[in-house]
Image (spheres, helix red, strand yellow):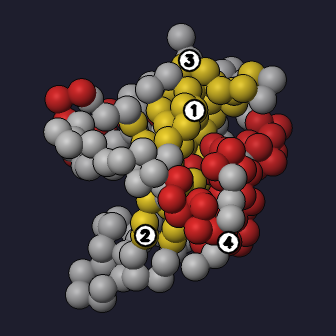
Amino acid sequence: MSAPLIVPVLTARIPVDLQLEFPLPPADAPIREPFVDDIYVSYVLDFTDRYEYVAPRRCAELGLAPESLREQATANLRTRRTALTMDWSSDATAVSISFRDDGADETLAGTGRHSLSLDASLVLDDDLMDKLAQDVEGDLVVAMPARDVLVASGTAHHDGLAELRRTVQRVWTTGEDRLITRDLLVRKRGEWAVLA
């Protein structure tokens, strides 16, 4: 087990009524850091057949400081970019960004293997987001309604923003369990915020 297996996963805040009745001890509770609004970054060790959330106890075993997780996990995510695809809409005002090898299910039926959805986590890759921001007009805007969905456009592309909103609506009506947010996020001067 090593630090190169750690990747970031975006999650939504857990509503109070769904939180554990008997919470885990602090050393075993998954590390969560605020990202923007009610979205958090968690970290997982991505093994071939399973994944495990990173807790302070695991950081100590790996000799990692918890505050170094985001940098390490984002660097590890960057190494997976060779499997990245960008599908621009026919009018080039919106782009869908995904990993080719990502599947639709956390467990691939009958194989014992999982597919950890990391597409939305790509918003943490500043280099990729800087490049993408150069390809759109206005400020970069993303929709990441679920962990396996990342669609981007620019504030000057009104039809692109409409496409992002349609994507959010479509994903949220499926009721899947990896939902993150209905909000669109805008990136200004390297910082993310909810698009007003």
Among numbered discs 3 and 4, the one appearing first in the sequence? 4
Among numbered discs 4 and 2, the one appearing first in the sequence? 4
Q: Residue at x 31, y 78 (%)?
A: 108
Q: Residue at x 72, y 26 (%)?
A: 191
Is any part of residue 143 visible from this angle? no
Q: Is residue 120 left or right of residue 154?
A: left
Q: Residue at x 42, y 45 (%)?
A: 26
Q: Is residue 77 above or below residue 94?
A: below
Report the residue marked by disc 1.
35
On the image, the x and y values in percent for residue 103 come to 40, 70
Report the residue marked by disc 4.
4
Q: Nearer the viewer, residue 64 or 167?
A: 64
Q: CA distance from mark 3 to mark 1?
A: 15 Å
Secondary structure type for disc 1: strand
Q: Quadrant of the N terminus?
A: bottom right
On the image, the x and y values in percent for residue 175 come to 21, 43
Determine whether label 3 and label 2 are within 8 Å by CB.
no
Report the residue marked by disc 2.
51
Is any part of residue 55 visible from this angle? yes
Secondary structure type for disc 4: helix
For the residue marked with disc 3, what is the amino acid?
Leu
Q: CA distance from mark 4 to mark 1?
A: 22 Å
Q: Nearer the viewer, mark 3 or mark 1?
A: 1
